[in-house]
Amino acid sequence: MADKKKASMARRKQEIQLQQEIETQEEWEDVMSKEGLYVIDVYQEWCGPCVGMVGVFKKIKNDLGDPLLKYAVAKADTIDALEKYRGRCEPCFLFYATGVLVAVIRGANSPQVMRTVTEQLQQEHKVIDGSAERKEIKDPYISMVDTMDNDMEEDEEEAEEGRPASKKDGKQMRFKGELVNFGDENDRSQESKKEVTVAVIKPDAVQAGKVDEILEEIRAKGIEILKDEERTMTEEEASNMYTHLQDEDFYKDLIAFMTSGPSHILVLTKGRTGENIINEFRDLIGPTSVEEAKEKQPESLRAKHGNQTYMNALHGSSSEDQAMRELAFFFPDYAIPVAEGKPKLQRTLALIRPDAFKHHKDEVLQMIHEAGFKVALQKEMSLTKEMAQDFYKEHEGQEYFDELTTRMSSGPLMALGLAREDAVEGWRSMLGPKELDKAKEEAPDSLRAKFAVEDVVINQFHGSDSEAAAQKELDFFFPMQQTMAVIKPDALGTKDEIIEKVHDAGFKIAARKETQLSREIAEEFYSDHKDKDYYNDLVEHMASGPTMFMVLSREDAVEGWRSLIGPTDPEKAKEESPESLRALYGGDILKNAVHGSSNPERAKEHIQKIFDEEEMQDQEANQTEESAEGDIEPPTEQAEEQEHEAEAAKTEEPQQQEQTSTEEAKPTEEETPKEEEKAPEETPKTEEEPKQEETQKEEEAPKEEEKTEEAPKEEQKEEEVKQEEEAPKQEEEAKPEGGEETKPEEPEQKSEEPAKTEETTEEAKTEGEEKKGEETKTEGEGAA
């Protein structure tokens, strides 16, 4: 043990010798006054310096042996000059040449760090020799923060003068260090910058007179040209731009070529946010090799206008870091435009009925993606005959009703929540006419025509016929839930990006808190992992720094969040789900960025451990205020009605106050077993009975379905008994509230809200008891 401690101390001493430690403003100013190139790892005390890069720094230092190259670690917590890096410096490397910022790298990117060190060291020698000038840059990210701070100061001035301040309160609270925030993501997205890329039309294409043609082809792809400047590169500029190719045999010829005549330097973006512009432009220009481009992508710009390997007409940034570096290099004072607000998306329910699901699922899903739909919700499940009859009860009495419900309950189907600007009409257009003969004649390429089943008159797809119908139908297949989401200490620096993806996935943040867990609370939070080998390491990591906890609300929230975060091992996540949060932000199994509750019961336990009743009430009040200001998506008429009913119930029965959730979710988490036992008696209520009882039925339905979907291991036997006793109730609770909107499936005109008689309900209940085993199995299936 003593030997290990000595070895650890020895390694620590070597690191200190390699990297000067800067902890005060005076030490920082002293370093800034010294000659040489300083590579400074900016860190905060709770996470420490980037240990993984120490070996890289040692190798560079040994290989180059240059006395001008120096390393340092700087604690942002105690250095005034680094105040803006607090909360956004992991990992962050600043390159200072005699006190002047010349480069910035975010992320432990070893190859990029090595290239940048080599480039900047060469440049610094030239500056010292008098053959070049030092080029100062601004950190693009910090510049964006400065812009946001200026906006907030303007708001404060407006408020002091009695003028209405613009809606940046949530963002302002966050920058002032408040731990619990609300509604600031929308403001942040409004202030965030567009993604851009830098492109170069090379001298060969310029000399050939192809600039206008290339610019026209770029615009034809919907790409916006923000800046276009003609300039002839110096040898120094070309060398800095292509340092990564300096070991290639053609390097000298490339530099000579790039300085042989004028080039056009472009700054490009696309759409409201510029999202994916870097990859899209690189796909447009094609492979680096002109020969490969002509073979594999003959329509690419390099295939059309290039000549040979380095005379390939165009250059495009290969990554966001490179784009920012090239932008700072060519246009150091350029201000990137602010991203525009995202368009309002519609949602609709799509059903792939059993026959089409069995034979054509993958093909249909591919067509959905190609049509620009985002699959926000997805579930494979089986319906009982009674559930199918309930869903299509408006068609009861029609001659096709029995065959329709029989087909719908004949095997597994797929339910999808699709999102697009025109989702309802867009999906119905893809489906084509309801009548198969008409679909085959008028729209032979539609889904209903293309995937019709021989000798079957029922078409194979369903789509909501209005936004209101879509909401009711989505509630039927995807009941509202809440889950606990955790952004771990290792990923807190990327919380804004993660939160944006949370919203993109359709979740509402019902409550949030940023706090540092004590070891005791961390042990309790992960008590179900107590017997695992990694338990102590996990607890220590979770108590090592600030953690963000969020209560997320959405249909099928538990499975939806677990699907979004991906497999526990980030390496496995990168292979199986490359867009998942753990693939994007995780480091290893322990530091895998995020956590999600395993089932609805665990979600409830976690929420109660982290958020007390008073906090939930305060956050609910804040959300109500922000919704009135327009920071939160306004509720639908149905949601408003339910909210008013819930408030009325709360006034009459104060003791049920804990059952009230946020305005963005149904209060499913706090109900008692006694209330659950009453559910079968309340299910047959007709729509004429008090609305308060309808609301209670709505609230209980998601809970029962959640329990069936995934019970905790320690209560598995008890849950199996409950499932058998409550299966008839689950069948009735799965039914959407009141009358359904007109279904688009069948040719008959449907009534707005057909009354459901008590006799019909009782009959369905009796049949449900006979089918209870089958239904329990059905509802136990998780989201795909």
Image: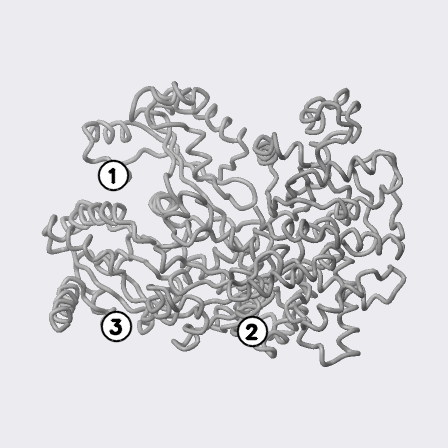
* Residue 557 location, quadrant: bottom right
Residue 96: horizontal and vertical position, in percent? Answer: 25, 57
Residue 712: horizontal and vertical position, in percent? Answer: 53, 63
**CA neighbours of label 3 inside 10 A, class few (<14), some (14 to 19), many (20+):** some
Q: CA distance from mark 1 to mark 3?
A: 34 Å
Name the residue tied to disc 1: 244
Q: Earlier in the sequence, mark 3 or mark 2?
A: 3
**CA neighbours of label 2 inside 10 A, class few (<14), some (14 to 19), many (20+):** some
Name the residue tied to disc 2: 608
Check disc 3 and report its element: helix, strand or loop: loop
Above or below — where is 451 with respect to 88? Answer: above
| Mark in front: 2 vs 1 | 2
Q: Earlier in the sequence, mark 1 or mark 3?
A: 3
Residue shown at the point (68%, 40%) measured from the top left: 351
Name the amino acid type tagged 2: Gln
Q: CA distance from mark 3 to mark 2?
A: 40 Å
Name the amino acid type tagged 3: Glu
Residue 631: horizontal and vertical position, in percent? Answer: 64, 61
Check disc 2 and report its element: helix, strand or loop: helix
Above or below — where is 214 with respect to 164? Answer: above
Name the amino acid type tagged 1: His
Q: Earlier in the sequence, mark 2 or mark 1?
A: 1
